[in-house]
Image: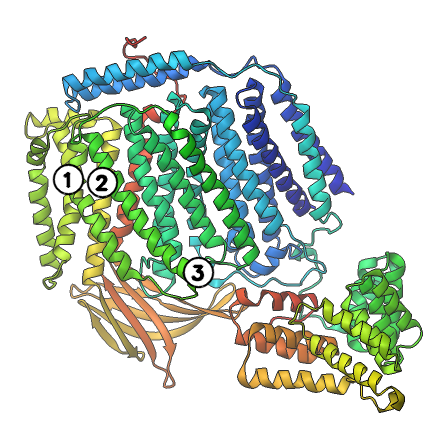
Amino acid sequence: MAIELGHFALILAVAISAISAVAGLWGWNRSERVALFLRQGAVLQFLLVAAAFAALIQAFVVSDFSLAIAYQHSHSAQPLLFKITSVWGNHEGSLVLWVLILVGMGVAVAMFGNNLPRELLALVLAVQSLLVAAFGGFTIFTSNPFTRLSPVPPEGMELNPILQDIGLAIHPPLLYAGYVGFSICFSFAIAALISGRIDAAWARWVRPWTLLSWLFLTLGIAMGSYWAYYELGWGGWWFWDPVENASFMPWLAGTALLHSALVMEKRNALKIWTIFLSIITFSLSLLGTFLVRSGVLTSVHTFASDPTRGLVILALLAAFIGGAFALFALRASSLRVGGLFAPISREGALILNNLFLATATAAVLVGTLYPLLLDAFTGRSISVGAPFFSLTFSIIMVPLLVLLPFGPFLAWKRGDIIAVTQRLAGAGGAAIFGAILIFALSGAQISLAPFGLLLGFWVAFGAMAELIDRAGFGRMALSLSFRRLVGLPRAAFSTAIAHFGLGVTVIGIVAASAWEVEIVSTMNPGDSKTIAGYTVTFDGLEEVRGENFISETGRFTASTAGGSERQLFPERRFYEASGTPTTEAAIETYGFSQLYLQLGEAAEDGSHVVRAWHKPYVTLIWLGCLIMSAAGVLSLTDRRLRVGAPRRAAPRPAPAE
Amino acid sequence: MTIWLFALILTAIACATLYYAGAGRTVNAGRSLPDATNEHFRAQLKAIDTDAAMGRLGAAEATAAKGELAREIMRFKEAAGGAGSGRFTVWVPILLVAVLSLGTYYFIGRPDLPASPLATAAAPQGEIDLDTAIAQIEQQLAVTPDDLRGWQVIAPAYMQLGRYADAVRALRRVNELTAPTADSLTDLGEALMMQRDGNVEGEPMQLFRDAAALDARHIRSRFYIAGEDTRAGNFEAAIGEWNALIALAEGNEPWLVTARNGLAFAEQGLTAGTTGPEEITVPDDAAIDAMVDGLAARLTAEGGTVDEWTRLVRSRMVQGRMEDAQAAYTAARQAYPDASVRTELDVLAADNGLVAQ
């Protein structure tokens, strides 16, 4: 009953969205009532899809295998958390999650958009409803999560054990929130193009939404990367896998959008470019969805490939992206360009940032799509691997990172590059010192790594230098500078912290890639091996029973020269319901570095292959992402972005009126 | 029926709120537009002053920026029009919403299926044997002889145990309780055929013909008809039937080989017309067994694709050799541990009571 009611709720939500889209696109400028109708529609869409999602969760929790996807992707012996996450651990359910977040974004616009001009509100909600209708319709008619089975199978087939991890509870919802959040920017862009006006509200709205989506996407990608790192069992944290690229491209474009929206919000410039980026970013999100959901790419993300679904998604993709760009081509010229500025200025620096990020996005796009297109048109199968991406990407990123610290120092409209360089000298010196220090501590050989480190420190210290300079440390009394620092706007802090986080990530990437040590050896209980100063002793094996698996757990002790000892328990698991084996790595964190241990199969003589890695400073990679996200949160709490929040007191009357 | 009631209530509530929003009063329509816009321009102006004060913006540039802002505001004032106050017939979209959602659900929903959470379902498989389960269902059916689902569940179990008379009784009940379908008629025909040691003349044949009449694309019943026509020497009718069957095939069905063989035999029989039907060898059960055994041997020895395994499991089930089907299914699962590639196989197995071992 609950399942069927959920099914009906989903259908009703999609029906409302379809009618809302038509009503909104037809009548956005005809009557004020249309906007009110659409706003109510958005609320209903959210409530109904949430109810449908709840019905799915309920069916999974009570193991109702008359629901086909519960039968195919769940098992009564799974722990409760994984029964719940199984809901989106499959194609159909993950689409419902996607649509749920989409309608969640729509209802947020409806609720907080009280002060939007009615025409704009109607158009934005209409475009948003169109997206819901398209993807909800796709869900219902090609990938219906509410398909029933009769007779009811006695037991389910279990979720893929690799996905039976806390990561599935966090990674997809975050990533989807990121992808789908950009739909709001997209809807605003389309609304601006249709109405031919960029309302003042546009600038106020697009930036917080970009920030929010970017924040979720950053966390989602970082989480996915860490999950792959500890679950796939060979310690890689980024594979330039097409599915990863699919999430990375919207991130790059979204980062560019974040910066261009800043210019637009503060200086009314770059309007058309921002609209263009909004469309690009969401298009790349859709492309990512297409690549992952269509089954074009085979990976752990591809739950079931079905050519019909692929074609339908491709058609939707073509319609939305093609339609958006056609509209852009037709209408962009009618929009007004904004403020003027000199090439060397804050605006100029942000344009440079956008150029580099756009180029990087294009490089990743080419590397991801080229093999697919080649395969589709000529049948030749090639693989564009990590070397291509590492080389191309770093060539584009290095100049961006070199120039990055200059940006926040430059004045708006016209800047003075020489003065800025002088102010950054201190940061440069500190960066050199830091790079040499780490290099010496790691005791590594001469390579390109120190330059990478230097770059990372340069970005990190350059970001901090901006704060120090603005607070006036060294130019005035310490207490005064301190007070000035505290009084700086949150935007200044969030910029500096985000750039600092990027520097931290760069340092982590360089250190972990350059100085990683790996040993592979056969070990018997009692054996010891030494890796990067740690002595790893194999103490023995034991069989442990989990809720739905049997695990062969190795007991290892890692001891350092300093005498500290820690226990590690890498596992080989066997999931009984599906008969699937998995490996669970054991990871110990020492400072920012990690010791990573993986237990291999037993040989004839009872010995085990053991792979051990020492990954210096590897946690900095994700730590940097967390810092960047924290900066995003900080920026979101800035008053000026709280749309509709009443102002405490207007500082002065607006003279321009 | 209750589900329809709830669906109607849900639709009515949704439509009512939409109607209220779209046609209701618009007095509490939020803050007026100019406020929001002014606030934005004030914020921008303040930002210019702050930047200028902190040295982020030169004095001349700040003046220029303010000028740009002023021009922007003036242009806005000219353009600000607000939404029109034209007519919006709100009941049209609302009616469409109701029709669209209820109609779609009518076509793709399954209001007939109840929820069946594991806790209330029968005890887990493996802990009770088939006989006990059948006894339980029989008891239940004695109390509620109109329980269609009970008869549907018990009939295949009877077949599996070789209790054909009981199977016939159960399947007759199924056909009484609900409108007969091609499947349910063919099931009954098969049970009768098994009860008569493979003889299809009379009632079974009539049932197959009824089934084929109900659904012209129903493979199983038409297969029996074609086979019987071939056996009885009605070659012209048989050729027509075999050809029709082959035309129904998509090309990779496991029964296609048998159908082609049957066609060849029938054609041979027709040309050899005078020699009489006795001399014609029809692809009998032994030939089919040999073919399926050959496939099984090859897959066991050399392995094969998931499709081939699926075909083997299906053939075993068609032969009625459920233990072999189970064995083939187990072997297939071992050969393809990745559940994502064997969805079709798993669904087939689950539908027919095979267990994942």
3D distance between C-alphas at marks 1 and 3: 47 Å
Any part of residue B132 in sight: no
Q: Does residue B100 appear to the left or right of A41 in the view shown? A: right
Q: Secondary structure at mark 3?
A: helix
Q: Picture coordinates of residue A161 (x, y %)? A: 48, 63
Residue position marked by numbered label 2 in the rendering: A499
Residue position marked by numbered label 1 in the rendering: A462
Q: Are marks 2 and 1 on the same chain?
A: yes
> Which of the two discs, 2 and 1, labels the residue nearer the N terminus?
1
Judging from the image, mark 1 belongs to the subunit labelled A
Q: Where, by quadrant of the figure, is residue A261 drawn?
A: top left
2 vs 3, front mark: 3
Q: Secondary structure at mark 2?
A: helix
| Residue sitting at the far front | B271
Of the 4 image quadrants, the one containing the C terminus of chain A is top left
Q: Which mark is residue A377?
A: 3
